[in-house]
Image (cartoon, rainbow, N blue to C red):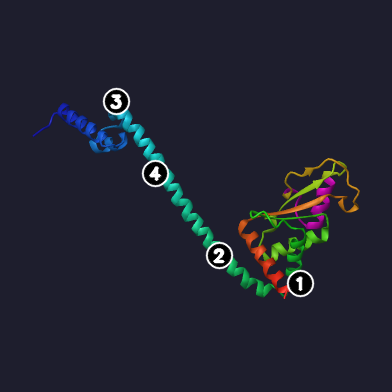
Amino acid sequence: MVVSRGKYKKEAYEQAISFRKRGFTYTEIAKICNVSRGTVSNWLAKEGFSAAIAQSNKKQAAKDNKARIKLVNKARNAERTTKYTEMLKHAETEYKHYRSSPLFTAGLMVYLAAGDMTDPRVIRLSTSKTDLQQVFIRFAIEFLGVDKKALHLWLLLYPAHNEVRSMKYWSQKTGLSVAQFSKNQIIPGKSNKQTLQFGVLNTIIGSILLKKKLLKFIELATKELQK
Protein backbone atom coordinates (compact mmCIF):
# COMPACT_ATOMS: atom_id res chain seq x y z
CA MET A 1 0.00 0.00 0.00
CA VAL A 2 1.38 3.37 -1.01
CA VAL A 3 0.84 6.20 1.45
CA SER A 4 0.32 9.57 -0.17
CA ARG A 5 2.82 12.33 0.60
CA GLY A 6 0.01 14.52 1.90
CA LYS A 7 -1.17 11.83 4.32
CA TYR A 8 2.40 11.28 5.51
CA LYS A 9 2.85 15.00 6.13
CA LYS A 10 -0.40 15.09 8.07
CA GLU A 11 0.69 12.17 10.25
CA ALA A 12 4.11 13.78 10.76
CA TYR A 13 2.46 17.06 11.70
CA GLU A 14 0.18 15.35 14.23
CA GLN A 15 3.18 13.51 15.69
CA ALA A 16 5.09 16.77 15.90
CA ILE A 17 2.23 18.38 17.84
CA SER A 18 2.08 15.40 20.20
CA PHE A 19 5.81 15.27 20.84
CA ARG A 20 6.02 19.01 21.30
CA LYS A 21 3.32 18.93 23.96
CA ARG A 22 5.43 16.32 25.76
CA GLY A 23 8.37 18.74 25.80
CA PHE A 24 10.50 17.53 22.88
CA THR A 25 12.73 20.06 21.11
CA TYR A 26 12.40 20.99 17.43
CA THR A 27 15.60 19.09 16.64
CA GLU A 28 14.39 15.94 18.41
CA ILE A 29 11.00 16.11 16.68
CA ALA A 30 12.64 16.58 13.28
CA LYS A 31 14.66 13.38 13.76
CA ILE A 32 11.64 11.39 14.99
CA CYS A 33 9.32 12.57 12.22
CA ASN A 34 12.00 12.41 9.51
CA VAL A 35 11.49 16.02 8.43
CA SER A 36 13.72 19.08 8.49
CA ARG A 37 14.00 21.24 11.58
CA GLY A 38 12.77 24.15 9.44
CA THR A 39 9.57 22.24 8.70
CA VAL A 40 8.99 21.57 12.38
CA SER A 41 9.57 25.24 13.12
CA ASN A 42 7.03 26.27 10.45
CA TRP A 43 4.47 23.88 11.93
CA LEU A 44 4.90 24.87 15.56
CA ALA A 45 6.27 28.42 15.74
CA LYS A 46 2.81 30.00 15.81
CA GLU A 47 1.36 27.53 18.30
CA GLY A 48 0.92 29.23 21.67
CA PHE A 49 1.74 26.12 23.72
CA SER A 50 4.98 25.65 21.76
CA ALA A 51 6.42 28.98 22.95
CA ALA A 52 5.66 28.05 26.56
CA ILE A 53 7.41 24.71 26.10
CA ALA A 54 10.40 26.45 24.53
CA GLN A 55 10.68 28.66 27.61
CA SER A 56 10.31 25.64 29.88
CA ASN A 57 12.98 23.73 27.96
CA LYS A 58 15.30 26.72 28.19
CA LYS A 59 14.89 26.92 31.96
CA GLN A 60 15.42 23.19 32.32
CA ALA A 61 18.53 23.31 30.15
CA ALA A 62 19.94 26.10 32.31
CA LYS A 63 19.14 24.10 35.44
CA ASP A 64 20.73 20.96 34.00
CA ASN A 65 23.79 22.92 32.91
CA LYS A 66 24.16 24.42 36.38
CA ALA A 67 23.93 20.96 37.93
CA ARG A 68 26.46 19.60 35.44
CA ILE A 69 28.92 22.41 36.20
CA LYS A 70 28.46 21.76 39.92
CA LEU A 71 29.27 18.07 39.44
CA VAL A 72 32.31 18.88 37.29
CA ASN A 73 33.62 21.35 39.87
CA LYS A 74 33.04 18.83 42.63
CA ALA A 75 35.02 16.21 40.72
CA ARG A 76 37.80 18.69 40.00
CA ASN A 77 37.98 19.74 43.65
CA ALA A 78 38.19 16.11 44.73
CA GLU A 79 40.93 15.47 42.17
CA ARG A 80 42.77 18.61 43.26
CA THR A 81 42.54 17.62 46.94
CA THR A 82 43.93 14.17 46.16
CA LYS A 83 46.76 15.73 44.16
CA TYR A 84 47.64 18.11 47.00
CA THR A 85 47.57 15.30 49.56
CA GLU A 86 49.89 13.16 47.47
CA MET A 87 52.21 16.08 46.85
CA LEU A 88 52.52 16.82 50.58
CA LYS A 89 53.42 13.19 51.25
CA HIS A 90 56.06 13.34 48.53
CA ALA A 91 57.36 16.60 50.04
CA GLU A 92 57.99 14.85 53.34
CA THR A 93 59.97 12.14 51.58
CA GLU A 94 61.90 14.66 49.50
CA TYR A 95 62.70 16.71 52.58
CA LYS A 96 64.51 13.75 54.17
CA HIS A 97 66.74 13.51 51.10
CA TYR A 98 67.31 17.25 50.66
CA ARG A 99 67.74 18.38 54.27
CA SER A 100 71.51 17.77 54.30
CA SER A 101 72.06 20.08 51.31
CA PRO A 102 73.33 23.57 52.25
CA LEU A 103 71.61 25.05 49.19
CA PHE A 104 68.28 23.48 50.17
CA THR A 105 68.43 24.84 53.71
CA ALA A 106 69.63 28.24 52.51
CA GLY A 107 66.81 28.47 49.96
CA LEU A 108 64.20 27.74 52.62
CA MET A 109 65.62 30.30 55.04
CA VAL A 110 65.85 32.96 52.31
CA TYR A 111 62.18 32.48 51.49
CA LEU A 112 61.19 32.38 55.15
CA ALA A 113 62.93 35.74 55.60
CA ALA A 114 61.93 37.59 52.41
CA GLY A 115 59.21 35.55 50.71
CA ASP A 116 55.43 35.92 50.54
CA MET A 117 53.98 33.41 53.01
CA THR A 118 50.31 34.37 52.62
CA ASP A 119 49.28 34.23 48.94
CA PRO A 120 48.44 30.56 48.22
CA ARG A 121 48.64 31.01 44.45
CA VAL A 122 52.21 32.17 43.91
CA ILE A 123 55.75 31.94 45.22
CA ARG A 124 57.14 35.48 45.42
CA LEU A 125 60.53 36.54 46.76
CA SER A 126 61.08 40.29 47.16
CA THR A 127 64.55 41.60 48.00
CA SER A 128 67.16 44.05 46.78
CA LYS A 129 69.99 41.70 47.77
CA THR A 130 71.46 39.93 44.77
CA ASP A 131 72.97 37.05 46.73
CA LEU A 132 69.60 36.12 48.21
CA GLN A 133 67.95 36.16 44.80
CA GLN A 134 70.76 34.03 43.36
CA VAL A 135 70.43 31.45 46.14
CA PHE A 136 66.66 31.23 45.84
CA ILE A 137 66.67 30.93 42.06
CA ARG A 138 69.17 28.07 42.25
CA PHE A 139 67.04 26.46 44.97
CA ALA A 140 63.84 26.77 42.90
CA ILE A 141 65.43 25.17 39.86
CA GLU A 142 67.13 22.32 41.73
CA PHE A 143 64.63 21.44 44.46
CA LEU A 144 61.26 22.65 43.15
CA GLY A 145 61.97 21.54 39.59
CA VAL A 146 61.15 24.94 38.11
CA ASP A 147 62.18 25.55 34.53
CA LYS A 148 64.47 28.58 34.43
CA LYS A 149 62.33 30.09 31.67
CA ALA A 150 59.20 29.75 33.84
CA LEU A 151 60.52 32.29 36.36
CA HIS A 152 58.92 35.73 36.09
CA LEU A 153 60.46 38.96 37.36
CA TRP A 154 59.43 42.52 38.05
CA LEU A 155 61.11 45.46 39.72
CA LEU A 156 59.89 47.89 42.35
CA LEU A 157 61.60 51.17 41.46
CA TYR A 158 61.70 54.83 42.45
CA PRO A 159 61.47 57.58 39.81
CA ALA A 160 65.23 58.19 40.09
CA HIS A 161 66.03 54.64 38.99
CA ASN A 162 67.05 53.90 35.40
CA GLU A 163 64.59 51.15 34.52
CA VAL A 164 66.52 49.65 31.60
CA ARG A 165 69.81 49.76 33.47
CA SER A 166 68.21 48.11 36.51
CA MET A 167 66.72 45.27 34.43
CA LYS A 168 70.06 44.63 32.75
CA TYR A 169 71.75 44.61 36.16
CA TRP A 170 69.37 42.02 37.57
CA SER A 171 69.45 39.99 34.37
CA GLN A 172 73.22 39.73 34.66
CA LYS A 173 73.12 38.87 38.36
CA THR A 174 70.40 36.21 38.08
CA GLY A 175 71.28 34.76 34.70
CA LEU A 176 67.69 35.30 33.55
CA SER A 177 66.62 37.04 30.36
CA VAL A 178 65.37 40.62 30.32
CA ALA A 179 62.41 39.19 28.39
CA GLN A 180 61.27 37.48 31.62
CA PHE A 181 60.51 40.84 33.24
CA SER A 182 56.86 41.82 33.36
CA LYS A 183 55.68 45.40 33.93
CA ASN A 184 57.78 47.07 36.62
CA GLN A 185 56.21 49.27 39.30
CA ILE A 186 57.39 52.84 39.85
CA ILE A 187 56.51 54.29 43.26
CA PRO A 188 56.61 58.01 44.05
CA GLY A 189 59.20 59.33 46.48
CA LYS A 190 62.88 58.97 47.01
CA SER A 191 65.00 56.27 48.64
CA ASN A 192 68.13 57.04 50.61
CA LYS A 193 69.13 53.38 50.87
CA GLN A 194 72.21 52.47 48.89
CA THR A 195 70.94 48.88 48.62
CA LEU A 196 68.09 50.11 46.45
CA GLN A 197 70.23 51.55 43.70
CA PHE A 198 68.84 48.93 41.29
CA GLY A 199 65.40 48.54 42.89
CA VAL A 200 63.76 45.59 44.60
CA LEU A 201 63.52 42.44 42.51
CA ASN A 202 60.41 40.30 42.75
CA THR A 203 60.92 36.73 41.59
CA ILE A 204 57.62 35.02 40.82
CA ILE A 205 56.64 31.37 40.36
CA GLY A 206 52.95 30.96 39.64
CA SER A 207 52.01 27.54 41.02
CA ILE A 208 49.65 26.61 43.84
CA LEU A 209 51.12 23.11 43.94
CA LEU A 210 54.72 24.31 44.28
CA LYS A 211 53.70 26.92 46.87
CA LYS A 212 52.19 24.17 49.01
CA LYS A 213 55.34 22.09 48.61
CA LEU A 214 57.61 25.01 49.53
CA LEU A 215 55.56 25.84 52.63
CA LYS A 216 55.66 22.17 53.65
CA PHE A 217 59.45 22.17 53.32
CA ILE A 218 59.64 25.30 55.48
CA GLU A 219 57.27 23.80 58.05
CA LEU A 220 59.38 20.66 58.36
CA ALA A 221 62.63 22.61 58.56
CA THR A 222 61.23 24.97 61.20
CA LYS A 223 60.02 22.09 63.36
CA GLU A 224 63.40 20.40 63.09
CA LEU A 225 65.26 23.58 64.06
CA GLN A 226 62.99 24.05 67.09
CA LYS A 227 63.75 20.66 68.58
- Tag on residue 64? 4
- Alpha-carbon span between mark 4 and mark 1: 56 Å
- Residues in magenta, as a range: 164-179
Identify the element where label 1 is drawn: helix
Q: Looking at the picture, how far across and down is residue 191, in whole percent?
A: 88, 47
- Alpha-carbon span between mark 1 and mark 2: 27 Å
How busy is the neighbourhood of tag 4: few (under 14 within 10 Å), some, or many (20 plus)? few
Which residue type does callout 3 highlight?
A: Gly
Q: Quadrant of residue 15?
A: top left
- Alpha-carbon span between mark 2 and mark 4: 32 Å
User: Is the Cβ of the residue at disc 2 closer than 8 Å to that at disc 3?
Assistant: no
- Residues 82 and 207: in front is 82
Residue for badge 1: 102
Residue for badge 2: 85
- Alpha-carbon span between mark 3 and mark 1: 79 Å
Which residue type does callout 2 highlight?
A: Thr
Most extreme residue toward the left is: 1
